[in-house]
Amino acid sequence: PIISIAGISPDEITNRNPSPVISILEPNLESSRLTLNTEPFMSGTTITAEGDYNLHILARDLAGNEAEASVSFTIDKTPPQVNISGIQDGEIVSDTVSPIIQVTDRHLAQVAITLNDQPYTSGTPITEDGSYMLKVVAQDKATNNTTVTVSFKIIRVRVERFLSNRPRVLVFAGFEGPGSGLSTSQRAFLRDLLDRKIRPDIEALRGKDLIGNERHQRTGSRGNERGVQVQLTAGLSNG
C-alpha cells in the first residue's frame, strides 16, 4: 500500500488547528489502522489542543504486504513570555539603569531588542540623560508574537551646593541647554521630592545624584547652564 498524509508536515510547529487527511492507495486493501498518540484517529479530524503529536498509519493488503507512515508535529498557540526587570514603564530615574530582558518559550525562534530603535543587549548600562523606549519583539516557531515596550526617562539632578539661609534652599544643577528652561517632565520630576516627603541628610547627600521636584524657579538668566532652586520645608539636618 502507498500511504500519503496531507494537512500537516513532518516536525511542523504550528498555531493553527490542523486536519490531517490520510490517503491509502491500494486496490486490494485488507485493513488500515490510524492512531494519534496511540489513540484511534479518523482521517480529516481537526486537532485543536496544544501539544506534541505523533500520527501513525499502518496499512495491509490482501497479500499480507504492510506499509507504515508517521508524522510528528506540535500545536503551539502560546506566545513567548517577555519579562523586563530593572526599569518600569513610565518610570523616571536619576541614575544608571541596566534593564534585564528575559524571553521564554518552548519553541523560541527569534528575539529583537531595541533601545530608541537601535539594537540593545540585555543588561547594558544606560547612563545618559534622556527619554528612552525599550522594545522587545519575540516570535516562536509557530509564528506566535509578543511585543513589550517600556518607556522611561533618566534625569540627573546633582546637589551642587547648600545655602545656609533659612528656610534652607538646595540648588540643583544638571538641567542644561542653550536658552532652555525646565521641561514639563523636569518640573513633574522635581515635584516628586516634596510629594514623597523626602527628608534628606545634607552631609549624606552632598555631591550625590538626587531625584528632585516642586516649588521651582529658574536661576541664571544667561548662558547654557540652568539651575533649579527647590525649597525644602522640613526634614533638613544641620550642615
Image: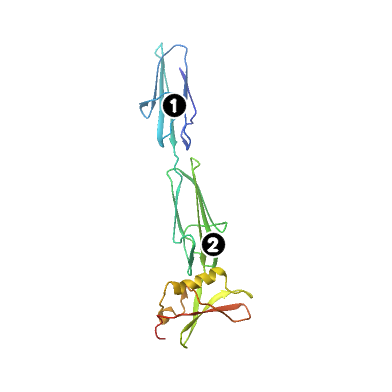
- Residue at the limit of the structure toward the left, as seen here: 38
Front position in the image: 25 or 65: 25
Kind of element beneath mark 1: loop
Indicate the position of residue 19 as horizontal and vertical percent values: 47, 28
Front position in the image: 147 or 97: 147
Front position in the image: 43 or 61: 43
What colouring does the structure picture have? rainbow
Quarter residue 52 falls in = top left
Kind of element beneath mark 2: strand
Indicate the position of residue 177 as horizontal and vertical percent values: 61, 74
Q: Which residue is mark 1?
A: 45
Q: In this rendering, is residue 44 above or below 234?
A: above
Disc on the earlier residue, 2 or 1: 1
Q: Residue 148 has which mark?
A: none
Disc 1 residue type? Thr
Please indicate whether residue 180 sits to the left or right of residue 108 in the image.
right
Indicate the position of residue 218 as horizontal and vertical percent values: 57, 79
Disc 2 residue type? Tyr
Q: Which residue is mark 2?
A: 132
Q: Residue at x 53, y 77 (%)?
A: 216
